Each structure stands twice: as C-alpha cells, then as structure tokens.
Image (cartoon, rainbow, N blue to C red):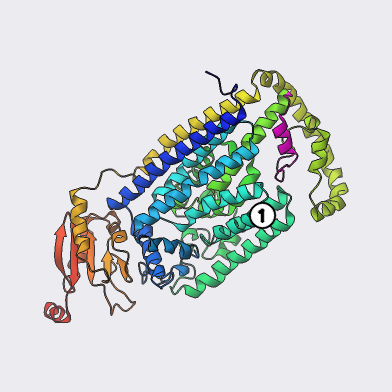
Amino acid sequence: MKSLKQLDLRTQRRIAWGLLILAMIIYTVAMGLESVLRYMTFKATAFDLGNMDQVIWNTIHGRPFQFTNQAIDWYGPPNRLAVHVEPILLPISLLYLLYADPRTLLIFQTLVLVAGAPAVFLISRRYLPSWPILATVMSAAYLLSPALLGLNIFDFHPDSLATPLFLYAILALSNRRYIWFLVLCFFACTCKEDMPLAVAMFGVLLIWKYRLPRLGLVLLVGGTIWTYIAFRVVIPHFYTGVLANNFWYRYETLGNTPAAAVANLLLHPWLLFTNVLTLDRVYYIFSLMRSSGFLCLLAPEWLLPALPKLASNILSDNPPNYSGIYHYNAAIIPFVMLAAIHGTRRLILIWQGWSKEEIRRDELELLTGRPAPDTERRPYPAEWIPSGVRNQARRGWGFLARLFSKVKPALSRITLPIWRKSRLQWQSFSARMYPFTKKVSAYRLQWVVCVWLVFTMVLNFFIITPQLNSFWVDHLPGAREQQIQQLIDMIPPDASVSASDDLNPHVSERQYLQVFPEYCLDVTCNQTVQYLLVDLDDPTLGNRAYAITELNSLSCQYRLLKGASDVRLYIRIDDAQKSKCSA
C-alpha cells in the first residue's frame, strides 16, 4: 500500500475532501440531534430561543422585530431593535414559511456553522497547497473548537451566521472576488450591532497585510459608520427603558458610562490587572488559542479583526462573556482559524528556510502573489528568498508606499542599527537550527502539526466537557415530556401566556408572551396574560418554594387548570370571581 508521500497530489486531495465530507456529516447529525433533543427535553431557554422564536414568528406575520418576552422588565423594549440590531432576522424569518418551529432555527444554525468547514479547508489549501490532509485537520479543529460547539448548542442566535460569513469573506478575498467579499461583509454586519466593528478592523488588515488600501478604507469607514448608527441612532430610537444603556451593567465596575470607563482606565491603569486581566479571563484567552493548537500565536497580526469583540468580552463583568462558550465568540472564531492557518504556513516556510530545503513551485507561486494578493512575502530570512519575490513584495502599495518613502530616511536612521542586530541574531539562530531541521523535513513537520492539532482537539474535549455538560441532553423524550406537551396543547394558539424559562420556547409563537414570574402586558398591569405555564422545578426561579409562593400570590387572579410532572397550567379568572376572591 502506498504511503501518503508516495501518493500524487490529486489523490491526496480526494482523500482530504472525503475526510472533510465525513467530518461534516458526523458533526451535522450529532449537533443537529443534540440541539433538537435539548429543545424537546425542555432544556432550551426563553433567553434566547424563546425570544428569537417570537421575534421571527412576529416578523413573518407582519410585525417586524416585535417581541414581548422582555416587554416590561428592566430591558424595557417591545422591539428587538432596542436590544440588538440584527437585520438578518428579516431573511431568516422566511424559513417560517416552510415550517414555523424553533427546531427549524436550531437545524438551520447547525447547517450554517458546519458550512464554515469547507471555507476553512479551502483557505488552508490556498495557503498550504502542498499538503491537503492538513487542510482537513484544520477544518476538524474548527468544527470541534469549544467556542463553536458552545455557539451551536446554546439556543439560536443570529450572530452565529457571522462565523461562516467571515470565513467565506476571507476565502473570496483570497481569490480576488472583491464583490462577493463586500457582499459577505455586508451580511456579516447585519448579524449583530458589534459585527461592523470587526469589519472595520478587517479593513485595517486589508490595508496592512493585503496591500489593498482602497478596499480597506471602504470597510474601515463603512464599518465605523454602521457601528455609530446602530449604537447611537437605532437602539436609542427603539429603546424605551429607564437605563441609558441596557447592557452597560456588564461594565459598571469600570465606570458608570463608557466615557467614565475610558477615563478610569487611563487614570487608573492598575484596573486592567485587578478587574480585567484576572485569572479566569486569561484562561479564556488561553482556551481560544488552544482551540487551534496555539498556532494562531505564530501569526498574531491576523487576529486584528477579532480584537474588538475579544476586548468587550474581557472587559465584561458577565461571566458567560468570557466563559469560552455561548454565542459571544462568533466574530472571534473565524480569525483565530485564519491566524492558525497563516501561523502554520509561517512555521513550515521558516522551517524550510532553516533547512535550506528547496521550495516547491506551487509554494513559490504563492509567495509571488499568484493568483491572490500575497500576504506573507517575508516568512523566512531574506537571503533565502529569490530576488524576483523580493521585488514583487515592493509592489502594490500605491499612495501608502509613496507616503512611506518620504519618512523612510528618518526611520532608517533610528531602526537600521536595531534591524541589523536582530538580523544577525536571526542568522545565528538559523545556523544553530540547521542540523536539527535537516533531520526533520518540512513534510514530516506537517505530520507533526497534524498530530499536535489532533492532540489539542482531544485535550479541548476533556477540558470543556464539564462546562458543556449542562447543555448536553441527559435523557430522551419520555412520559414527562408527553404530559407537559398535553398541557401546552390545551393553550389556544392566540392566547397570551407567561411561561417559565424552560417552557417558554414551546409557547413562544404568539403575539403576547412573558417569562414567569412576569405576567403583566403593560407597565400599569391593567392587562395580564390569559395563561400561566409554570415548571415548579425551573432552576431560574431559584427554588420550588419561591415558585409556589409566587403562584399563591396570584390565587385571586388565576386558577389551576391542570398539572402534570411538577408543571402547572393556570387560567385567568373573570372579574366576578376576582371580586369574590378579594372579598
């Protein structure tokens, strides 16, 4: 039987594609089934599957972005746009023309996330053309990263769509498909109000690494304007609550307002070490890097677009933000994978430089920027790069190159001695590495990278298991689920309902909905819901005694209709019965 090294590149590609398709099928079946079973066993929650289901159901019924699941609590708004700016919900709502059910959203989210794997594969093939198997392993690292698993399993969130959209935007950019690139970036911005800031930083990356200043400026300016409009125009317009910023509670330890937080960080920089760079937050950063085998650290500049979201997570006082799971990492995952791919490529090419191994023709073509803009023209010492490649690296800067040429003499006088010293140190280190790298070829190094990635995948699984155990299904639907469903079927589809957190997503396709213990439909409580559906053992209610106390306090407004398996269904009594009870 031939070894992989003896197989021609075409055969290796076929094997790689086959393994990728197999991994995608396994992931789709496993995660799709887990997501649906989690809903069917009442482990999905009102925040956020119940919210999203009601918003999308209302949208497709002519009430765009409306929801009452948080209507009179401290969030304030009866409209989703007052909480998050997610225009992507408009096309997503078309799914409910096919089948209006929360499970539609869960399956759709799984399919969207798994669709990012081919993008990772093709980007890896683009920058690591000589070894297709490594592209498959990199795709598997994406699928099994704890951040993606947490994003997939915890309810449905529209920002999860940004993960594959960013990946395909990177792929389109690598293949000079600039129109598609802009379209994909546009749709990524529609996923949530903080995505345009990632796009703006992506623009900086285009100017810096891709040598595309005009396209980069479009993203930088467009993303910044979109961010301003979302935070300063759209959300304040729809927000009716009493708080100036309905999410600033997560950052209040830094200051009462964003301006105060910035001032405190500037005047009291030690807050970074006492309130921000704590052990759990450092471990969160560590876990994100570990998902790609720490290879992203070899090309950290490619993480630039992920910095805004990473900063907002680290600065937050809300533990889920920096837990490493949930949906707060949607804008981080794509660029961790991009940095890991470039880091792997940088490692291999430096290794080839140390061993003075002959560079393959396809790798040399990649270095010269054909067919896509080159982004790593100096991955190893200059004396081992052909002169044609060095000349090619000087082209494409445009007006930035002319601007730099004016200040270059002054910079050279400052940096030249430092650069010469560092270059001599690099050459000395390279000479010491030569005997070792001659024994381990670049081909064997790629095997080592594959084994290392597989090892970190297994390590991630064992480390993240305790955190994900609360999300995984621990039993199949049985008699209890059937009894609860019978109670749900007793509620008319047009009736208003207040349901406990775990039952809420099962009754959320209606115009008026609340999360128990809330039961009012207006601020003055002149209107109340018609039905209460309460799980006495719902963990968000604190304990069973609290749930019973709350229900007893409503005994003059609601009567028990039926109960089953610690779940109670109450119906609102008429005014005459209320008066009699009060008397």
- Residue displayed at 55% across by 72% down: 233
- Residue displayed at 86% across by 48% down: 410
| Residue 406 percent location from the top left of the image | 87, 53
Instruction: Look at the image and say whether residue 289 sits in the magenta stretch.
Output: no
- Residue displayed at 65% across by 17% down: 439
**Which residue matches tag 1?**
178
| Residue 190 percent location from the top left of the image | 53, 62
Image quarter where the C terminus lies is: bottom left
What's drawn in magenta, residue-wise? 356-377
Instruction: Look at the image and say whether residue 364 sits in the magenta stretch.
Output: yes
Q: Amino acid at mark 1?
A: Tyr
Q: Residue 339 sits in which quadrant?
A: top right
| Residue 3 percent location from the top left of the image | 55, 20
- Residue displayed at 47% across by 73% down: 238
**Res 238 visible:** yes
**Res 270 visible:** no
